[in-house]
Image (tube, coloured by chain):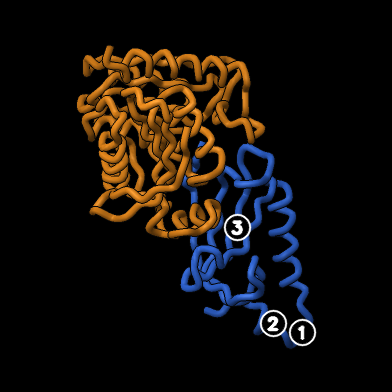
Chain colours: A orange, B blue
Amino acid sequence: MRAQTVQIRGHGDDPIESYLAQPLDGVPTGGVVVIHHMPGYDEATKEITRRFAAHGYLAVCPNLYSREAPGASPDDAAAAARAQGGVPDERLVGDVAGAAAHLRSLGSSNGRIASIGYCSGGRQSFLAACSLELDAAVDCYGAFIVARPPEGMPFRVGPIVDLAPNLSCPLLGLFGAEDQHPAPAEVEELERALTTAGKEFEFHTFDGAGHAFFAPDRPSYRPDAATEGWQRIWAFFGRHLTTH
Amino acid sequence: MCTYQTITLTVQGSGKGPRGWFPVTDATVYFDHPAHAQAEHTLNVDLLNPALGAGARVAVELDPVSARTLAEAILHTLEIVPGGLEGVATPQR
């Protein structure tokens, strides 16, 4: 595998620092756009990106805070982006589109692309899959797809469940039964919206897990849920990112 | 969850960051995932000077009890400022 920092073109043709990991065997394969969580383009997210390459996929993680804080450390960049109101939805979609185009341009791409995101990135993965032509999408405990964030906050984030009819690809949802945001009732509402829209989806809610159960560097880590969750991801991508 | 909760305000003073002292002009207060503290959520305060770049930042991540204790200590300290200095300690309106 080779992992490196590259520059891609995002929303508005802006240059976006990104972390690219790719297998070196040259075998045609699918690509994964990794959408980082609100704490930023950090070590943990880069490790996730490498993990996809270790499993044979092309993977790229765009630094969604490139514009606010180019070259800054991830935590400083996250703080700067938060102070400026976070990532607008339209810009996120443009950055994911740019990341997907970059993956498709690689010589070993088979042309199939998925998005995956964690926490705020889970919502953004769903948003991207409802806004772009993708082949698969994974939402890991994304909040505020159904619910509305607290009033009076500067963030430009609102519910997007109404976009369900636009979902362009199968959706895998991985949630914790003890999570409050998204609470199980919100996950059920999203399920109803997808069912009504006739979309293909697969949701798993893990007992004994709350929010961020995939994060091994946080006390919320739940190894049983994370291990099974990764197995679900590999099976899902195996079905939707291969061409044979 | 990522709470998205954020209060922003302007401030006047100085902070000491990784490159030494600098004037602080802005602050954000929020309850959300920490970058370093071993808790799912913490009360976070960033003292910033955006004009100097994203690295001009003094950050703390506190558990909720510590944050309340600190906030009360700050308010109490301001309340017992010796006479004659109130103009400094009283918010300008």
Q: Which residue is mark 2?
A: B86
In this rendering, is residue A126 above or below A96? above
Residue at image coords 42%, 33%:
A22
Residue at image coords 33%, 36%:
A159
Q: Is residue A207 visible?
A: yes
Judge from the rendering whether residue A208 lies leftward or rightward of residue A235; answer left or right: right
Mark 2 Cα-neighbour bin, 10 Å: few <14, some 14–19, many ≥20: few
Query: How far apart are the alpha carbons under marks 3 and 2?
Result: 25 Å
Residue B31 picture location, percent across and down: 57, 47
Q: Which residue is mark 3?
A: B45
Residue at image coords 32%, 41%:
A99
Residue B77 picture location, percent across and down: 75, 69
Which three-letter amino acid code belongs to the residue tagged 2?
Glu
Please give the chain letter of the residue carrying mark 3. B
Q: Do marks 3 and 2 both belong to one polypeptide chain?
A: yes
Element class at badge 1: loop
Q: Is residue A144 visible?
A: no
Which three-letter amino acid code belongs to the residue tagged 3?
Val
Q: Are marks 2 and 1 in contact (CB under 8 Å)?
A: yes
Q: Which residue is mark 1?
A: B83
Query: How far apart are the alpha carbons under marks 1 and 3?
Result: 30 Å
Mark 3 Cα-neighbour bin, 10 Å: few <14, some 14–19, many ≥20: many
Element class at badge 2: helix
The answer to which of marks 1 and 3 sits earlier in the sequence is 3
